[in-house]
Image (spheres, rainbow, N blue to C red):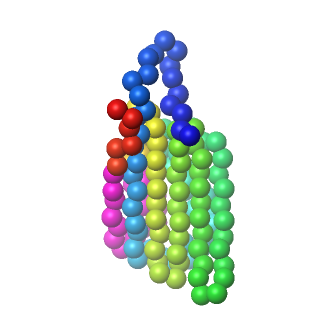
Amino acid sequence: MSLTPQVEGSRSKGVVGKHVYGNLYGVDPNILRNEWFLRSLVIKAAEIANVHLVEVKSWRFIGGDKEGISVLALVLESHIAIHTWPEYGFATVDVYTCGDHSMPEKAFNYIVNALRPARYVMFNADRSSD
């Protein structure tokens, strides 16, 4: 459940949800295998998005002919996630925030610029309650 921080004396007009997500193609596989670099990206992305970082977790998957890393930043306002498939030079990025103060587009663009894909697609969804 995502919570929107309230300023004392303000009245809630519902949840303001902003979801920016996309696919990145042609990313250097060595970057997509660098767990600590990816963790640092989501930490900085949270700062850029103007959200409050709660915790960062990451997982490295190795098995058979598939490998990848998933990094998830839990933020008070929701989450930031990166999932990678190095053998395909492919990653997905997901930035979902709640609150007027958050800037998920800036966080998404920061991550894209750092990963330097050959191309990418970005989607936006309004996840607001009103």
Residue 116, relative to residue 101: is it above or below?
A: below
**Residue appearing at x 39%, y 35% in the figure:** 129
**Residue appearing at x 35%, y 67% in the figure:** 120
- Quadrant holding the N terminus: top right
Residue 13, relative to residue 81: is it above or below?
A: above
On the rendered structure, is 91 left or right of 30? left
**Residue appearing at x 39%, y 51% in the figure:** 20
Residue 110 in picture, x, y percent from top left: 43, 54
On the rendered structure, is 66 left or right of 26? right
Residue 92, relative to residue 6: is it above or below?
A: below
Residue lying at the far front of the rendered structure: 129
User: Is residue 99 among the parts visible in the rendering?
Assistant: yes
Q: Is residue 114 magenta?
A: yes
Along the line of sight, which residue is nearer the eye, 39 or 54? 54
Instruction: State which region is magenta.
Output: 106-124
Residue lying at the far bottom of the rendered structure: 65
Residue 42 in picture, x, y percent from top left: 55, 53
Residue 104 in picture, x, y percent from top left: 42, 46
**Residue appearing at x 34%, y 32% in the figure:** 130
Residue lying at the far top of the rendered structure: 9
Report the label total.
0
